[in-house]
Amino acid sequence: MKAIRTFTVRPVLAEALAPLDRLAANWRWSWSRATHALFASMDPALWEHIGQNPARMLGALGQDRLDELAHDEGFVQRVREEDERLTAYLEGDRWFQRLEGDKPAHIAYFSPEFGVDGSLPQYSGGLGILAGDHLKSASDLGVPLTGVGLFYRAGYFRQSIGDDGWQRESYPLLDPYGLGLTLLRDGEGSPVEISLDLPGDRVLHARVWVADIGRVPLLLLDSETPSNSDEMRRVTDRLYGGGGEHRLLQELLLGVGGVRAVRAWCALTARPAPDVYHTNEGHAGFQGLERMSELITQDGLGFDDALAQVRAGTVFTTHTPVPAGIDRFPRDLIADYLASGLFEGLDAGRAIALGLESWSGGDPGVFNMAVLGLHLGQHANGVSVLHGEVSRGMFGMLWPGVDVDEVPITSITNGVHAPTWVHPALKALSEQAWGDAHTDTHDWNDRSAVSDAELWGVRQQMKAALVSEARRRVAASLSNGHAPAWIDDLLDPEVLTIGFARRVPTYKRLTLMLRDPERLTALLTDPERPVQIVIGGKSHPADDSGKILIQQLVRFSRDPKVRGRIVFLPDYDIGLAKDLYPGCDVWLNNPLRPLEACGTSGMKAALNGALNLSILDGWWDEWYDGRNGWAIPTADTATSDEERDDAEASALYDLIEHQLVPRFYEREGGVPVAWLDMVRHTMTDLGQKATSDRMVRDYVQRLYVPAAAHDVALRRDGFAGAKALAAFVARVTDAWPHVSIASVDSSGIPAQAQAGDSLEVTAAVRLDGLSPDDVAVELAYGRTDEDDTLARDHSVQRLQPAAAPVDGVTTFTGTLPLAVTGTFGYTVRVVPAHPQLVSPVELGLVTSPS
Ligand SMILES: *Cc1c(COP(=O)(O)O)cnc(C)c1O
């Protein structure tokens, strides 16, 4: 008989073991090796069996074993030590506390998925893992941040592969209590419930689970509550389960419900209200409309004032240059929801306009969550330098008339949480050399700290662990349950091992390596210097084209000729990833450039000493330096997709055959010395750059601190600043069509200008009722190219008003030193000037000489 509901009954812990409850309830155990080891040691086999989770472990152990452990003095001592370490971790001052200057009081970080640990499968891929790593680094750095997401009862699916090679999905249900989450309750002990009024007299209710991620709380809204109708209970059933309206309901719950949950949380825990709201991708965009509605109904602000206030404190991170990766809803569907009274006081027509694709060539019948995100967030970024550039191009139409370089979207390159992703064996080696310091400054190039033999020994150990894990997984996945003899020949720790695992959208080109099967087979089966490939990846359940790619790979890998050298491991998730990255010599990534916004698996591999072999896309475009791996050249001149794939695959085979293989198999005393040089360089250089500690510090300093300052400045004195900014925006927007540059004069250029000369520049500007303080008249100057375009690194100087206006024309002047030599040029432009603008062009108002 099948139970209709299951839950975990917790045993009673003896006093000596009582701290285990607290240790199990804080997800720091997942990146603290000692706490992790403590729980695993209670019963190693059971630990594996229950999926490595302390709360589940405590539920599964049984009273007898617990009683036994309560009398084991060594164990009790370790419990006490871990408890003390957790306290010290939660209380001590960290990087953020030592940061000088004005700082944000509280950051609310919204994401549709969070990949914190394999036992909490609330993620589908990179976006979620990144969010999990963001929380962990925020915790390690002491940043006062709260995560906001949804609790999906089945999370993302588990994958198995049928005998036909076709992906199968299953959706095991999760028990939040049994995983170590806590239900948020009010002062009286009743569960806090969030409600949203929806059209058709429906109400969506949700409860809130709290997961403690070190010092950072993560609030997860869950529609599985008795107050809900069956329809509403299904809202948080699965991550990215349904389309259309189901997705919209999830996003309304995340955005609107998320803000309400944060309010309840702050009230119950006496935390300050957030002064920064960070939305990880557009899915949580409705949070901005909810905050506007609060400001309108509770503080009496007008629509524009509220918009200015919300924008000031909002950070929006875009994650995809693939249009299919952006949520788009029919305008009419959104209109129905906005008419329902969900956002009290908010002018529905104007609110909808914030998300419409209303530029020329856009589809004004479509409501686009990225557009909403950019309109509601004054601080926006992409996730690598290249992706920032691509995003400025992609969203440039929202700032017509603005040079693409100046579109106000910056970039912060992603990073990964080293304590989570560095293999314990490698971590032990670094502790032996440099102690326990949580730093990203180890110099792995120092052979006196770690010898080649030691480093190679650990690399080989990690590879051997992957090989046995792969054999175990493949055996377990065979339908008859009997491991055939060939399993013992599956993979070989002595062979050059290439890893490739990721979600399977088309642009990631899972099957590029199959382009020339004969050539691949030759590489795999070379009798002297073979290569082996380990692959993983899930296709979105609704994406049959992805499933076909998986099937092609699985079929190829089952051919007895290559079977021992190429394997597809099902159910790629955090657990598999943690075995995979450290166990590979090379991490392969071959997306269609520039569609990989950043990519983070290669960073995780690099921190474990794998070398990257990748298309110059995302982070690799930025940090590939010729010594940390190989760049697969992009066939930019190809005239068709086929031709490009052929060319890039062929370049891939060439690199493997002529670069990787010889270097890997060249040995001195059994050790590949030249290879290890690259490994050492990779670990040293990327160990500093590729961490989420670096990333979170960048977010704090470049986006959170300014956003909090803007929020506070506008909020002060009854929102005086917000009202003034809104009035300013209205005034300049109105006047701008009539602002013009009447003339620009320069004097003092001798016939032969030479370095050290200077130039007086005068611009006569018609301001049409604006005051000289409302605008900045900017002189841009620098080297020019053959089309007279100013170099990107040109300088900008503000000209000053010289006299009172005459006939509506104001004269601005300035002196320009001719400091650079060569072809030189300058130009003048007028833009709005206000201290609370992040970028001079953010209003899309720019006047140049006609
Ligand atoms: C890191 C990670 C990803 C993201 O990897 P990309 O390189 O961005 O494709 C996806 N899934 C898992 C399980 C990961 O650990």
Image (cartoon, grey):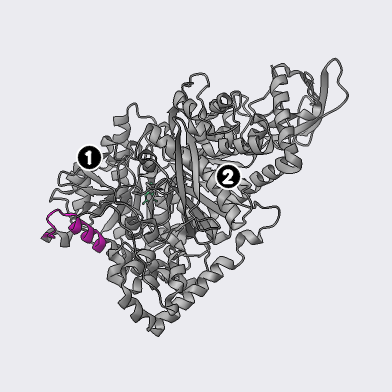
Toward the viewer: 527 or 248? 248
Please state if 123 lies on the left or on the right of 746 as rendered: left
Q: Is residue 441 magenta?
A: no
Please state if 593 lies on the left or on the right of 761 as rendered: left
Q: Amino acid at mark 1?
A: Asp
Toward the viewer: 194 or 68? 194
Please state if 789 lies on the left or on the right of 68 as rendered: right
> Could you tell me residue 781's position as x and y percent?
70, 31
Dot 1 corresponds to which residue?
516
Find the magenta span and give its range.
Answer: 467-484
Query: Within 8 Å: ligand 1 and the Cβ of disc 1?
Result: no
Q: Earlier in the sequence, mark 2 or mark 1?
A: 2
Please state if 619 lies on the left or on the right of 539 as rendered: right
Q: Which residue sits at x=59%, y=25%?
A: 786
Q: How many marks are shown on the rendered structure?
A: 2
| Labels 2 and 1 touching (C-beta < 8 A) | no
Q: Quadrant of residue 707?
A: top right
> Could you tell me residue 227's position as x and y percent?
42, 45
Which numbered tag is attached to residue 277? Answer: 2
